[in-house]
Amino acid sequence: MLHGFYVDLSAMLAAREARALLQRDLLARFHVPLLSYTLNIPGPVKTSAVIRRAFDAGLDALAAALAERNIPCIAREERHEATGDEAILALRGVPEEIKSIAVHLEETHPLGRLFDMDVLDAAGEKITRRVPRRCLLCSRQAQDCARSRRHSVAQLQEVVERLLRTDYEMPPPA
């Protein structure tokens, strides 16, 4: 499942910079909070047909949750590159409420462990989680495990593949 085009660190850094530029542009144009959505996919392959379906499932769940809370999306930018699938939504709502929705999806959706939903307020300040994310493999804080490289990429990929294969019945490709 995690087969596809390999990307290197320089490509990932360039994609991160492009995302930051787009965020700054959207903030300057709309002066509203932003939700930046990507997937946490370990290793050099960041997208494939299966990963894209998982991304779309998260985007659909996000759109439904925002609609349920009457938070309108006034602009949506999507990119689907070898460096990964990403969406940035400009939302007319309270940043903390938007972050609450994002955290709820990250914690309860069958694929939520893969979702990375960052929220920026209208000034571009990141809204942080109240409770840190847990590692995919152990009970420690995810950032600590990532920083210390406590788990191998192969171990993390195995968990991601299991999530994509068994924890969520993936719809057939369109």
Image (tube, rainbow, N blue to C red):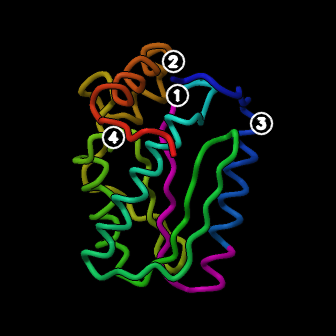
User: Badge 1: few (under 14), some or many (20 or more) residues near its Cα, within 10 Å?
Assistant: some
Please determine whether, in this image, residue 148 is positioned above or below residue 174.
above
Mark 1 or mark 4, which has the lower sequence index?
1
Element type at marker 3?
Answer: helix
Residue indicated by mark 3: 10
Marks 1/2 in contact by CB < 8 Å: the verdict is: yes
CA separation in Å, label 2 and label 3: 18 Å
Q: Residue at x 66, y 72 (%)?
A: 24
Q: Quadrant of residue 59?
A: bottom left
Q: Residue at x 62, y 68 (%)?
A: 23
Mark 3 belongs to which amino acid?
A: Ser
Q: In this rendering, which labeled residue sits more in front, label 4 or label 2?
A: 4
Mark 1 or mark 2, which has the lower sequence index?
1
Q: In this rendering, which labeled residue sits more in front, label 3 or label 1?
A: 1
The percent coordinates of residue 156 (x first, y second) are: 43, 21
Residue indicated by mark 2: 153
Q: Quadrant of residue 158?
A: top left
Residue indicated by mark 4: 111
Q: Residue at x 41, y 36 (%)?
A: 143
CA separation in Å, label 4 and label 2: 19 Å
CA separation in Å, label 3 and label 4: 28 Å
The percent coordinates of residue 129 (x first, y second) are: 32, 56
On screen, residue 46 versus residue 144, left or right, reads: right
Marks 1/4 in contact by CB < 8 Å: the verdict is: no
Please determine whether, in this image, residue 146 is positioned above or below residue 31.
above
Residue indicated by mark 1: 42
Element type at marker 4?
Answer: loop
> In the rendering, which numbered label is found on residue 74?
none
Mark 3 or mark 1, which has the lower sequence index?
3
User: Badge 3: few (under 14), some or many (20 or more) residues near its Cα, within 10 Å?
Assistant: few
Q: In this rendering, which labeled residue sits more in front, label 1 or label 4?
A: 4
